[in-house]
Image: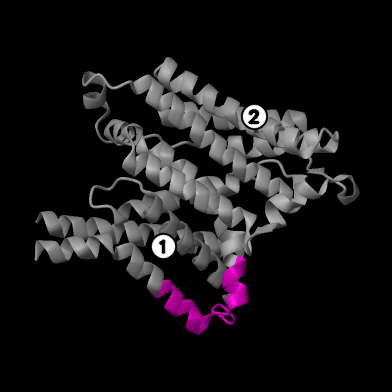
Amino acid sequence: MIERIAALQRFALVGALLAVIAFFAVFAPGFARPANLADVLLNNFALFAIAALGMTLALSIGAIDLSLATAVDLASLVFVQLSAHHVGTLPALLGGLGAALLVGAFNSTLIAGLGIAPFLATLGTLFIGQTVQQLATDGGQPVYLLNIALPPLFSQLAHGTLAGLPVPLWIVVVLAVAVHVTLARSVFGRYSVALGAQPGVARYSGLPVAAITTITLIVSALIYGVVGLLLSSTVKAFVPQAGNGYLLNAIGATFIGTTLSPTRRPGVTGTLLGVLLMSLVANGLLLIGWNFYWQQVATGVLIFAVLALSFVQRRGRYA
């Protein structure tokens, strides 16, 4: 009996995903069309998944990283500004990633160096990043790029293909494999999981807590920076505070993904399924005709329902 409950607990997310697909296949016109599903993967899933993979790394050490939005936005801002000054796509890419790296380094200084709680430290970084954007864009004005001034490589980031698969999806695959191997197959990953599960024990056991925290936060910020680069390549502009649209969704998808693990730890498979679930829900509600605000309400209810179901099943298991 206990084994059956545990199985139900682990597959609550898969069941929710199948139920959502079945529901929208019946009630949302055009939902099941291959063209629509391909559009979901490219336009709804890819950037969202990359952001959530970075959040998965951060949550592995017990840090809810609210600076995701800042890293996305500053990477996008620097990338677009450098592109507008015709420095070349590669230097602009490196500049954007460098801005994201600075966000991660700043977080690690506050958390690993000064001992500030991750939630508070990254919340402060979020506010600072919003102010920097306002100052750099005359109060929050978008920065647009003219197509004639853009080298071909710029657009290829978001719209190019490799072996028939869009470049953003290749990036998702590469990052997913890298994060999974790091968390599940490496010594660093085991240390990270130990720090996230029992930080006090990790410190008293002599683990290099500061180094683990610093590396994790910097790598997570770089992953968020990739989202900013791809977003800029997609819309050919910098839109202030666009990263906020990924923050709560990435946190929600990552927490939904933890229901796939018996130990409630974040993992790549669960995170990607959580992203897919939320992306399909958003697309299905759009096809039904719900506006953005009701989509947000439905997404919140969905997150609550999946987590509540998992909690009830876990209580039943322990009982």
Q: Is 279 positioned to the left or the right of 133 in the image?
A: left
Residue that mark 2 sits on: 99
Q: Is 204 positioned to the left or the right of 184 in the image?
A: left
Q: Report x, y in % for residue 319.
A: 9, 56
- Of residues 219 and 8, the one nearer the viewer is 219
Dot 2 amino acid type = Ala
Residue that mark 1 sits on: 302
Q: Secondary structure at mark 2?
A: helix
Q: Secondary structure at mark 1?
A: helix
Dot 1 amino acid type = Leu
Picture residue at 57% right of the left edge, 71% below the top: 37
Which quadrant is the N terminus positioned in?
bottom left
Colouring method of the image: one colour
Span highlighted in magenta in the image: 19-39
The dot on residue 133 is none
Picture residue at 45% right of the left edge, 27% below the top: 215
Asked where in the image residue 214 lies, by quadrant, the reply is top left
Q: Is residue 143 above or below residue 282?
A: above
Q: Residue furthest top?
A: 114
**Which comes sooner in the sequence, label 2 or label 1?**
2
Q: Residue furthest right?
A: 148
Q: Is residue 283 above or below residue 312?
A: below
Which secondary structure class fits the magenta region best?
Answer: helix
Q: For mark 1, does the 10 Å Cα neighbourhood hold few (<14), some (14 to 19), or many (20 or more) residues? A: some
Q: Is 186 positioned to the left or the right of 110 in the image?
A: left
Residue 104 visible in this rendered orientation of the protein = yes
Residue 236 visible in this rendered orientation of the protein = no
Q: For mark 2, does the 10 Å Cα neighbourhood hold few (<14), some (14 to 19), or many (20 or more) residues? A: many
- Of residues 119 and 226, the one nearer the viewer is 226
Q: Report x, y in % for residue 8.
A: 22, 65
Q: Nearer the observer, disc 2 or disc 1?
A: 2
